Image (tube, rainbow, N blue to C red):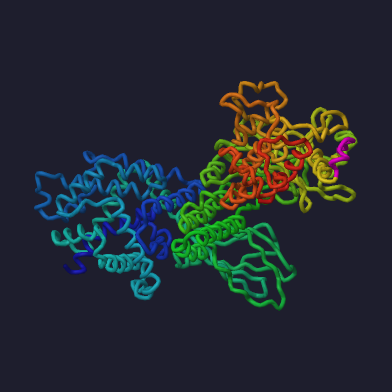
């Protein structure tokens, strides 16, 4: 079989399959015409992609498409193509039908023309499908499957699967990338764009056809032996059929094809493009280049701009180059690149002048690092493998943290002292797409590691504003993107204040978060020693104000000065009817952090609590009692009386643990028959029960007034730290139990928790015994809670 004959009958398959894999039509009438040579070489891998890998890639493109706000045009075109039927539109494949030999056309047993129509319609629909369920529906389409069966029957080959099409498409893509990288001068010899594309297709197909392992090539060989059509005739027929399908699907909207194709092209670039940066001129200049699979996107196609700092400007003569003004030593701005007037790249960049500095080449990207770790992880075992996986997770999180802050200061509008921030959906979409790409790279390097990533938070940073009343507005589409990206929460930041809202609270609705602050005067907080402003927070989800949360909201309050203050005794206080309720929290580096399950007015104060009866335990428990009382986690049993030798009930310990470790959940429910909704301890038992920290003494009873045993304390602390810190008992912890003479008396269901608590010094033994069934005093409980509060993990 001659090459020319092979090429003639495979141009259709190559164009469609390659186009479907990239989510873009590959022809001189499609993406190439929109973007130029570079984009016909879509992302290729060294091995054929699995279906899961194909779906992950599709997810990235879909996320980027949503970020561009143009998804509807793609959906409309896809649905329109899918709605075509053979009885009305069968003539659309006439250009190809005319090229087939009479023995196929005259076959009375098979309507091969309908087979052609069904295959073309299905693959044409794939081109404009960007959601997993859409592809799965096509994969299961009865007409397509029947057409593939008939194709196998006619040609005498085995039935093709969707994975076979993906493998062939990947081979063509890989060949196209290889051709662009190695034979660019020959490809460009044609001069005009259409000829360049034709040269590329021809060279890529020639290379792909040499792979005898591809099942598609068996069918291609059969067609080559049964047609006399020339290369040009088949190429023209392919183009006519594709254009006919799209035109017939959109008779009332002639612009829909262009809109959908352009939107998909932009989404593809937004999702798959990578950035390389080079610093020069002693830090005053940075040069950026965008590439797809190592092939640079021509600078003439991109428009670069910077916002946010007048000292940083785009070089008018060199695309992708930004400069720091000679009058400045540093600057930070947001850099954007647009393709066809749509943002495909955005990044906050900082330039620092470093006189006499030496150039340091850019560090490898996280994708390079994860690719390097992939083979090491695959070949490692045991502890070495675990260590490499943790290294991969650390690198992924470092990269995610570096890109997860969105500068929204440019979106601020202040009217009459009130600031509003309408967050850019495009900016959110770009960050989510970038984070998703990193997570996918981690998943590829260490399958399963993506499931144990720490909670990811995207920060919307408004900077310093001349306002004490700020509202952030985030639209529902952005919230959906954040949720779909597996992001835990959105952090709103302004004037040093921060609040992390778990996106689960939003339920894919728009949200508005408002924060107000005012001075902490005596009229507001009384005699307490305040170290922060009074902050008032509110949240609206959809159109409904939300006051209580199933997942706590973490707040970060700036503390300007701690002069003359014991920072261990600082606590977050809620102002309720002119009185203060204390909820704990921690101070570090000028900020106070605490999680709350309800919003109101809050202030950070120093809370000194004195007890007159703790002298005998002061040496070993005095400071611990003082700190945990300041945090509101423990209280006295009477005015000024702690009763350190008193026993601790199960209800009391539940409250201590919930308040100390921020496990409050106002919406939690419990089902114990001996806990009534009106009991003082009911909300704490409910919160601890819902978090899986406590269990009843029986299936239906909690025994709240029963004294708690040391083993029960240990297990509750261990479970609470697993919830809040992600830690759990390991082999070394269990081995530590061997040191206790009475280890055999520890209930089997409690051993893991006891082992963890004992080995980490949370609940310690005495004289070689753990004494699991003994009770603990209130002073001992305070020490245990203090240790859990300060546990680092």
In which quarter of the view is residue 336 placed?
Answer: bottom right
Which residue is found at the position 29% from the left and 65% from the top? 208
Task: Give above or below for 64 relative to 320.
Answer: above
Instruction: Name the foreground residue: 482 vs 17.
Output: 482
Picture coordinates of residue 734 (x, y %)? 58, 48
Picture coordinates of residue 354 (x, y %)? 71, 73
Picture coordinates of residue 173 (x, y %)? 35, 62
Position of 341 with respect to 76 (left or right) is right
Residue bounds of the magenta highlight = 609-618
Position of 365 with respect to 333 (left or right) is left
The answer to whether one can see residue 598 in this image is no
Instruction: Name the foreground residue: 151 vs 70.
Output: 151
- Main secondary structure of the magenta stretch: loop
In the rendered image, residue 708 lying in the magenta stretch gets the answer: no
Picture coordinates of residue 117 (x, y %)? 23, 46
The quadrant of the rendering that contains the N terminus is: bottom left
In the rendered image, residue 615 lying in the magenta stretch gets the answer: yes
């Amino acid at each position: 079989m001659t090459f020319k004959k092979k090429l003639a009958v495979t141009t259709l398959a190559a164009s469609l399959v390659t186009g479907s894999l990239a989510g873009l039509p590959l022809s001189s009438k499609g993406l190439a015409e929109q973007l130029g040579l570079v984009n016909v070489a879509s992302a290729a891998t060294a091995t054929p992609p699995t279906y899961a890998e194909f779906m992950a890639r599709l997810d990235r493109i879909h996320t980027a498409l949503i970020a561009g706000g143009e998804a509807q045009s793609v959906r409309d075109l896809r649905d329109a193509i899918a709605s075509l039927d053979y009885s009305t539109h069968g003539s659309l494949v006439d250009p190809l039908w005319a090229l087939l030999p009479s023995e196929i056309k005259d076959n009375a047993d098979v309507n091969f023309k309908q087979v052609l129509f069904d295959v073309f319609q299905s693959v044409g629909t794939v081109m404009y499908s960007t959601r997993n369920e859409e592809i799965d529906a096509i994969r299961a389409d009865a007409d397509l499957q029947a057409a593939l069966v008939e194709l196998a029957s006619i040609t005498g080959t085995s039935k093709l699967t969707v994975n076979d099409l993906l493998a062939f498409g990947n081979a063509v893509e890989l060949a196209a990338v290889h051709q662009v990288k190695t034979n660019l001068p020959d490809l460009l010899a044609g001069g005009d764009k259409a000829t360049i594309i034709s040269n590329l297709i021809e060279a890529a197909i020639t290379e792909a056809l040499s792979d005898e392992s591809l099942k598609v090539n068996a069918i291609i060989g059969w067609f080559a032996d049964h047609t006399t059509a020339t290369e040009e005739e088949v190429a023209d027929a392919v183009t006519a059929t594709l254009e006919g399908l799209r035109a017939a699907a959109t008779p009332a909207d002639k612009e829909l094809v262009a809109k959908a194709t352009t939107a998909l092209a932009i989404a593809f670039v937004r999702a798959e493009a990578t950035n390389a940066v080079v610093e020069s001129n002693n830090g005053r200049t940075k040069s950026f280049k965008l590439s797809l699979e190592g092939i640079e996107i021509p600078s003439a196609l991109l428009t670069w701009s910077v916002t946010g700092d007048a000292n940083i400007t785009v070089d008018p003569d060199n695309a992708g180059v930004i400069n720091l003004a000679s009058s400045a030593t540093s600057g930070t701005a947001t850099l954007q690149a647009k393709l066809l007037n749509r943002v495909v790249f955005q990044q906050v960049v900082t330039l620092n002048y470093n006189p006499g500095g030496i150039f340091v080449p850019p560090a490898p990207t996280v994708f390079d690092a994860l690719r390097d770790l992939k083979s090491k992880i695959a070949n490692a075992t045991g502890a070495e493998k675990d260590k490499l996986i943790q290294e991969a997770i650390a690198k992924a999180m470092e990269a995610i943290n570096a890109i997860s802050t969105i500068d929204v200061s440019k979106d601020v509008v202040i009217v009459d002292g009130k600031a509003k921030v309408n967050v850019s959906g495009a900016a959110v979409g770009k960050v989510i797409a970038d984070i998703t790409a990193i997570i996918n790279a981690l998943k590829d390097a260490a399958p399963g590691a993506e499931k144990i990533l720490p909670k990811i938070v995207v920060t919307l940073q408004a900077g310093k504003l001349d306002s004490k009343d700020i509202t952030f507005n985030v639209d529902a589409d952005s919230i959906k993107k954040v949720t779909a990206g597996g992001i835990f929460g959105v952090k709103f930041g302004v004037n040093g204040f921060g609040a992390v809202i778990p996106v689960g609270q939003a339920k894919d609705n728009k949200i508005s978060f408002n924060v107000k602050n005012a001075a902490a005067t005596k009229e507001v907080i009384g005699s307490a020693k305040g170290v922060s402003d009074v902050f008032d927070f509110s949240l609206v989800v959809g159109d409904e104000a939300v006051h209580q949360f199933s997942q706590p909201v973490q707040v970060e309050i700036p503390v300007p000065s701690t002069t003359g203050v014991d920072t261990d005794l600082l606590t977050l206080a809620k102002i309720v009817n002119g009185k203060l309720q204390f909820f704990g929290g921690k101070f570090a580096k000028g900020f106070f952090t605490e999680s709350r399950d309800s919003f109101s007015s809050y202030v950070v104060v120093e809370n000194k609590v004195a007890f007159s009866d703790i002298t005998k335990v002061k040496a070993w428990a005095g400071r611990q009692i003082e700190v945990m009382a300041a945090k509101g986690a423990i209280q006295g049993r009477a005015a000024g009386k702690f009763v350190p030798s008193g026993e601790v009930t199960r209800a009391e310990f539940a409250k201590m643990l919930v308040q100390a470790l921020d496990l409050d959940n106002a919406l939690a429910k419990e089902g114990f028959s001996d806990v009534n909704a009106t009991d003082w301890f009911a909300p704490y038992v409910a919160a601890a029960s819902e978090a899986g920290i406590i269990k009843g003494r029986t299936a239906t009873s909690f025994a709240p007034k029963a004294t708690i045993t040391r083993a029960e304390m240990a297990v509750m602390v261990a479970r609470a730290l697993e919830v809040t810190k992600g830690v759990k008992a390991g082999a070394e912890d269990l081995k530590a139990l061997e040191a206790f003479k009475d280890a055999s008396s520890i209930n089997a269901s409690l051993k893991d928790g006891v082992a963890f608590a004992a080995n980490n010094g949370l609940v310690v033994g005495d004289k070689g015994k753990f004494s699991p069934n003994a009770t603990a005093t209130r002073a001992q409980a305070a020490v245990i809670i203090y240790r859990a509060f300060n546990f680092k993990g």
